[in-house]
Image (spheres, rainbow, N blue to C red):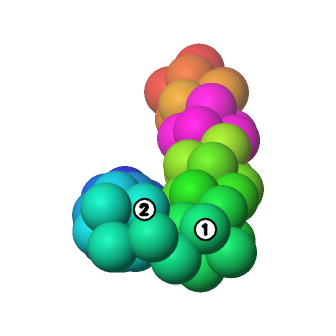
Amino acid sequence: MLRWTIIFLIIAIVAAIFGFGGVAASAAYAAKIIFFIAIVIFLVSLIAGSFRRN
Protein backbone atom coordinates (compact mmCIF):
# COMPACT_ATOMS: atom_id res chain seq x y z
CA MET A 1 0.00 0.00 0.00
CA LEU A 2 2.87 2.34 0.59
CA ARG A 3 3.79 1.91 -3.07
CA TRP A 4 0.42 3.40 -4.03
CA THR A 5 1.00 6.27 -1.62
CA ILE A 6 4.32 7.07 -3.28
CA ILE A 7 2.76 6.82 -6.75
CA PHE A 8 -0.03 9.26 -5.85
CA LEU A 9 2.47 11.59 -4.21
CA ILE A 10 4.60 11.65 -7.37
CA ILE A 11 1.49 12.30 -9.48
CA ALA A 12 0.58 15.19 -7.16
CA ILE A 13 4.06 16.71 -7.43
CA VAL A 14 4.16 16.42 -11.23
CA ALA A 15 0.65 17.84 -11.57
CA ALA A 16 1.54 20.75 -9.30
CA ILE A 17 4.65 21.50 -11.36
CA PHE A 18 2.60 21.66 -14.56
CA GLY A 19 -0.10 23.79 -12.93
CA PHE A 20 -2.93 21.29 -12.59
CA GLY A 21 -4.06 22.32 -9.13
CA GLY A 22 -7.19 20.18 -8.99
CA VAL A 23 -5.41 17.03 -10.04
CA ALA A 24 -2.57 17.74 -7.62
CA ALA A 25 -4.95 18.27 -4.72
CA SER A 26 -6.90 15.11 -5.51
CA ALA A 27 -3.75 12.99 -5.83
CA ALA A 28 -2.31 14.39 -2.61
CA TYR A 29 -5.58 13.68 -0.79
CA ALA A 30 -5.63 10.11 -2.13
CA ALA A 31 -2.01 9.63 -1.06
CA LYS A 32 -2.84 10.85 2.44
CA ILE A 33 -5.86 8.56 2.77
CA ILE A 34 -3.95 5.50 1.51
CA PHE A 35 -1.06 6.30 3.86
CA PHE A 36 -3.34 6.44 6.91
CA ILE A 37 -5.08 3.21 5.87
CA ALA A 38 -1.66 1.53 5.60
CA ILE A 39 -0.73 2.78 9.08
CA VAL A 40 -3.98 1.44 10.55
CA ILE A 41 -3.51 -1.96 8.90
CA PHE A 42 0.08 -2.07 10.19
CA LEU A 43 -1.02 -1.31 13.74
CA VAL A 44 -3.82 -3.89 13.62
CA SER A 45 -1.45 -6.56 12.35
CA LEU A 46 1.11 -5.60 14.99
CA ILE A 47 -1.46 -5.93 17.78
CA ALA A 48 -2.90 -9.16 16.36
CA GLY A 49 0.60 -10.62 16.10
CA SER A 50 1.35 -9.86 19.73
CA PHE A 51 -1.85 -11.61 20.87
CA ARG A 52 -1.12 -14.62 18.69
CA ARG A 53 2.29 -15.20 20.32
CA ASN A 54 0.82 -15.52 23.81
Name the mark on residue 29. none
Question: What residue sits 56% from the left and 23% below the top?
Answer: 50
Q: Which of the pair 1/26 is nearer the observer?
A: 26
Q: Main secondary structure of the magenta part?
A: helix
Whether the magenta-drawn stretch holds residue 44 is answered as: yes
Task: Residue type at mark 2: give it.
Answer: Ala
Q: Residue furthest front?
A: 19
Q: Which residue is mark 1?
A: 21
Q: Which of the pair 33/48 is nearer the observer?
A: 33
Q: Position of residue 31 (x, y in %)?
A: 55, 59
Give the mark, 1 or 2, whose residue is nearer the N terminus: 2
Query: What SS does tag 1 mark?
Result: helix
Look at the image and tell me whether residue 6 can be seen: yes
* Quadrant of the drawing holding the N terminus: bottom left
Q: Quadrant of residue 7?
A: bottom left
Whether the magenta-drawn stretch holds residue 28 is answered as: no
Tell whether 49 sits left or right of 2.
Answer: right
Q: Report the magenta residues as a range.
A: 39-45
Query: What SS does tag 2 mark?
Result: helix
Look at the image and tell me whether residue 34 can be seen: no
Check the image and report above or below for 43 versus 54: below
Check the image and report above or below for 10 versus 39: below
C-alpha gap between disc 1 and disc 2: 6 Å
Task: Residue type at mark 1: give it.
Answer: Gly
* Quadrant of the drawing holding the C terminus: top right
Q: Do callouts 1 and 2 mark residues in contact (Cβ within 8 Å)?
A: yes
Question: What residue sits 68% from the left and 75% below the top?
Answer: 22
Check the image and report above or below for 34 versus 47: below
Q: Quadrant of residue 14?
A: bottom left
Tell whether 27 sits left or right of 25.
Answer: left
Q: Position of residue 3 (x, y in %)?
A: 29, 66
Q: Which residue is mark 2?
A: 16
